[in-house]
Amino acid sequence: MRPATPEPARADAPAREPAPGHRLYAIALSILVTGLLSGCALLDAVRGPEIILYPAQRILTMDPEHPEATAVAVRGDTIEATGTLTALERRFTGRRVAVDRRFADKVLLPGFIEPHLHPYIAGILLPMRFITPHDWDLPGRDVQGVRGRAAYRERLAAWEAQLDESEWLWTWGFHHLYHGGLTRADLDAISATRPIIVWHRSFHEVIVNSAALSALEIDEDALGDTEQVDLPSGHFYEGGMQYLIPALRPHLFSLRRYWGALREARDILHAGGITTVSDGAFGTLDLDAEWLALKFSSWNRRDTPFRTVLLPDGRTLGELYGKEAASERIKALSARDTSRLRFRTDAVKLFADGAFFSQRMQLTPPGYLDGHEGEWLMTPDQLLEAAQPFWKAGFQIHVHANGDAGIDATLDVLDQLQSEWPRDDHRFALHHFGDSRPDQIQRIADAGVHVSANPFYVWALADLYAEVGLGPKRASELVRAGSLVRAGVPLSLHSDFTMAPAQPLRLAWVAANRITAEGNVVGPDERIPVDAALRAITIDAARLLRMEDQIGSITPGKSADFTVLESDPLSVPPATLADIPIWGTVFEGRLYPIQ
């Protein structure tokens, strides 16, 4: 028998009521589905967006394949994509996406990179009384510059009169060419009982009074005729500092004093839009003491808006551990890395000639116009001997070199190393690059050398050195950045804070304009284009640190580090570049506005 065919329901027939069991099942299913959907929505709310899209007025990526964009996608701490907002929204359809428009009227650049400063110098100097030739604008204090012998001594005496009886007087910023000569006897006249420590503007020299020598228990007989120490004048300079620093160390590294200074430096760096810092020579004073002080400082907090890369001082560590063993000891330092502090275990810093700020750099003939001579921190032979084991171990070598004779000596060392142990992509680096000759530029380019220059020498010293020491022609050609760029030499800019303000935009302004403190334009042929100046504080600085695959451009896969500007640096007149306000930074995907 065939089963009966059900009668089709009529359109006007009343709907059938579901059985009670079916009704309960439908209600339960509806509640379950609603609950699941609500749970998913709640989970999404808890998890937040997977990707954040930041539209901006303009994004200068420093990525040659995609040099500009108007939006960037960030996933966690990483750049996911760049393009237009419409294209990115379409690309990430179906993903948890949020659009954050707070940068819609701002300009984004890669996070600024400061490739050479020293945390320990900030820790030592920032607590001191500043008496400097130029004004300084620091958080919570403005320093009015003074010049002339009488004005300097008046300021020094005024500070001394304000101190409690037991306090020492510490001051930084003295410059003999701006402030006249200064000796131990001069300081004794200000106080015969209070220890006075005068740190030179260059950081490479200190003058102390008799009370300080006594308090520090420096044995005058033991020092005798030690080089680069003039004890009757209380003057320690260049290599002679190694006899003074150990005695000063207990005072300099008082943790309350030192950590407070690092907190101030942390704010200064953030205000400059900096997201990566490289210590220019870690371990110069005492590697373990410097490390512990930095590790437990504000620089190592999770809310610190920058990372610090620590470049070991190869000279000091080579002397401490032995030249052949030092490379292995340095490689082991990676075990100390934190999320904010990272050791360079493939590079070291060495030194050629003396400080530029005190005219101790080594010059070829005609030398200094007044007949004085420069100093070596490491003689050419010592520099070669120190460099050889690190070069053979595959290390990148950075060298402090200021004068043209210091640059010659450094390039000669590289030639010798390459002739004995040839290497490609060595990224041998010259730092500071104060006085150079035209013939050295092509030699630098041919050798594949990177240069990290301090353009602030031009602003602070070109006018003075035209009158004293170098003469107008050489002074106008300090820091030949334009020649380097035209020759294709990778160029980065650094402050060596406090040798210059830790303000990358200001350094870029000096390099692009070559305007001095007195308002003069010097060596206009050595100016560089603004886009080259911006590369020098972003991607080319990253290449110097061998970190171009991680930072330096707004490129997918790199760290989400941005400096946020209120104006477009490529649209404003170059003379106003340093005046662009900085909103703040984005570091590893987190926003850090400047308060």
Image (cartoon, rainbow, N blue to C red):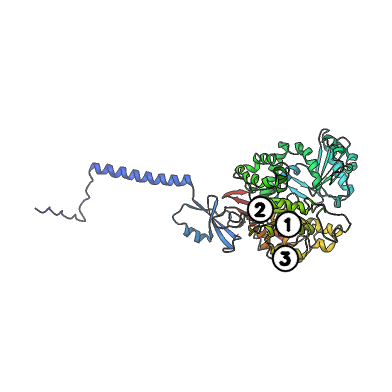
Please state which of the two labelled residues, at mark 3 or mark 2, is closer to the viewer. 2
Mark 2 or 1, nearer chain start: 2
Observer able to see residue 527 = no
Left or right for 142, reference 425: right
Residue corresponding to mark 2: 392
Q: CA distance from mark 2 to mark 1?
A: 13 Å
Q: The residue tagged with tag 1: helix, strand or loop? A: helix
Amino acid type of the residue tagged 1 in the rendering: Val
Amino acid type of the residue tagged 3 in the rendering: Gln
Locate residue 566: give its quadrant. Answer: bottom right
Towards the viewer: 210 or 45: 210
Q: In the rendered structure, are the residues bearing label 3 and label 2 in contact, judged by CB atoms less than 8 Å apart? A: no
Give residue 244's position: percent from left, percent from top.
80, 41
Above or below, 298 relative to 525: above
Q: CA distance from mark 3 to mark 2?
A: 26 Å
Q: The residue tagged with tag 3: helix, strand or loop? A: helix
Give residue 264's position: percent from left, percent from top.
70, 43
Alpha-carbon neighbours of circle 1 within 10 Å: few (<14), some, or many (≥20)? some
Left or right for 248, reference 1: right
Above or below, 115 relative to 442: above
Alpha-carbon neighbours of circle 3 within 10 Å: few (<14), some, or many (≥20)? some
Q: Residue at x 50, y 61 (%)?
A: 87
Residue corresponding to mark 1: 413
Q: Residue at x 53, y 61 (%)?
A: 84
Give residue 418's position: percent from left, percent from top.
68, 59
Q: CA distance from mark 3 to mark 1?
A: 17 Å
Q: The residue tagged with tag 2: helix, strand or loop? A: helix
Label number found at residue 442: 3
Left or right for 183, reference 530: right
